[in-house]
Image (spheres, coloured by chain):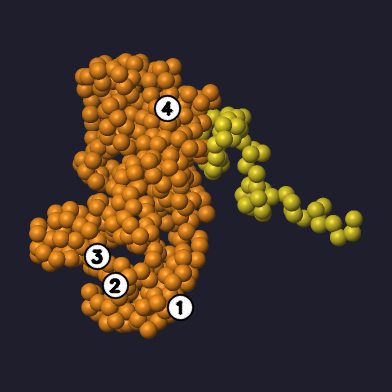
Amino acid sequence: MANEIYPVSWWGSPVKNGWGSIYYDYAETLSPTVSQYRQRVLDDGGIIEAIECVESNLNL
Amino acid sequence: MAIPSLAMIPSGYKDGKVYSVLPSNGDGDFTFSRGSSATRVNKDGLIEVLAFDIPRLDYSDGSCPSLLLEGQSTNLLPYSNEFTNAAWSKSSTGINTSVGTNGINENIAISPDGTQNADRVNFNLQSDLDSGMFDIFAASQNNTYSTSVYLKGEGSNIGKKVSIRVKRSSGGAFTSVDTDYTLTNEWVRLEIYPLTLPSGATNGIIAFSSSEATSCLIYGAQIEEQSHSTSYIPTNGAVATRLADECNSAGNASTFNDSEGVLMVETSALANDGTFRTIAINGTPTNVNEDRIQIYFRTDANIINFGMESGDSAQFFLQFPLDVKSNNKLALKYSASSCSFWINGFEVGEELNKVMPTGLSRLDFNLQNGGDNFYGKTKQVQYFNTALTDIEIEELSSWSSFLEMAEGQQYKIK
């Protein structure tokens, strides 16, 4: 398609520390333990915040 | 590094519960209660009101939140954010009453809660600290009162001073705390040195004036009968009370090892307020004998304490100097042959050949009997059911990078 931006830029491809970081989905890179924790909280009707802090503090 | 058998890093919560990351079956989740609403600074840096029994993950100290636990407190100013109200008297000597509503432009700016509800106070420049905008609050002799308020400058008033006087209203010897604050272009919560009313004094007065700034933005005034200011308690026509947070009952007998283990916490005290505040692995509440491992603040200022009790017999209660209002990583290792104590990666003490407690079954932000509630900001709690090696504890209780240490201790890097 003419003027397609995706193949020639980072548009739509946010990275953890850098371009588009505010759109970065931390859930994509969580360890199994933290990912399981996140899912347990959500399944129980809880709220998850700052999940990246869990990953950085737990030395798994 | 061993895997903790219980790990709570503030990130998951709901009504009545603080989730622990480990164990994965939920046995390590904390029961939480607070019988009133309360405020926090949310991840966007804005003040947010949370309902009854909702734990507060507070971001005022950085991008990773703390679990904020506070005691009960009352805002004694009935109109904390309605400065047009007649409860706030305006002296035409110190207030330019020809502007706005008797000197106040109501809801003129975006406040620290993110809505347009901050007022502007317009001053007549003069140096009498009693002639400005003031309110009288209920107070009693010999009690101590702490004041906080959000202020912000605009335009040419940035860099100029506003004066705040807190004093006794009548009776007793004249006593006041006078503070000059230089306005900036950002909202700043000004926490004023506490005032203790002298014998014979009745009630108190808070007064705002300026000899330099023609105006300032103002939000969220608060006076509490405390030795320190606590989180903002909004009022709207009457004094309001935030009830105490309680957080406890994580884990069970299978979580904890009576013979050996490590308790690690990363936390800070809210104040040196002369009270006991404990994080403990406790025995069962019905056990008449006290068995526990604890890390706690007590009456002495800037002292951290490590303790162990076995069958009502004190094994050790040790004290170490520490700036307790800073964020610190603390660890206690216990085993029959050796107990050791760690602060920010350094071993600070050791006790040999102690009797181990029995029946350890719950991690609480208080003592076994429900006393000594812990009030502070906690960034993590981890428990290991084996005695880690010194190298492992050093790593666990150290900062992993210069940046983490700087952020954890709230240094400003220039």
| Label 3, label 1: how far apart the Cα atoms are | 31 Å
Counting residues from the start of the chain, the first of labels 2 and 1 encountered is 2
| Label 4, label 3: how far apart the Cα atoms are | 44 Å
Viewer-side residue, B164 vs B137: B137
Amino acid type shown at disc 3: Ile
Which chain does the yellow colour mark?
Answer: A
Secondary structure of residue under mark 1:
helix
Q: Which disc number belongs to residue B231?
A: none
Q: Residue at x 39, y 44 (%)?
A: B36
Counting residues from the start of the chain, the first of labels 3 and 2 encountered is 2
- Placement of B76 over or under B18, stated as above or below: below
| Label 4, label 1: how far apart the Cα atoms are | 52 Å
Name the residue carrying label 4: B250
Dot 3 and dot 2 residues touching (CB under 8 Å): no
Counting residues from the start of the chain, the first of labels 4 and 1 encountered is 1
| Label 3, label 2: how far apart the Cα atoms are | 9 Å
Q: Is residue B4 left or right of residue B300?
A: right
Q: Residues within 10 Å of mark 2 (few under 14, many from 20)?
A: some
Name the residue carrying label 3: B136
Residue B297: image quadrant is top left
Amino acid type shown at disc 2: Ser
Name the residue carrying label 2: B89
Which chain does the orange colour mark?
Answer: B
Mark in the foreground, 3 or 1: 3
Counting residues from the start of the chain, the first of labels 4 and 2 encountered is 2
Amino acid type shown at disc 4: Ala
- Placement of B88 over or under B369, stated as above or below: below
Indicate the position of residue B74 as horizontal and vertical percent values.
Answer: 30, 51
Counting residues from the start of the chain, the first of labels 3 and 1 encountered is 3
Name the residue carrying label 1: B155
Mark in the foreground, 2 or 1: 2
Q: Residue at x 21, y 62 (%)?
A: B204
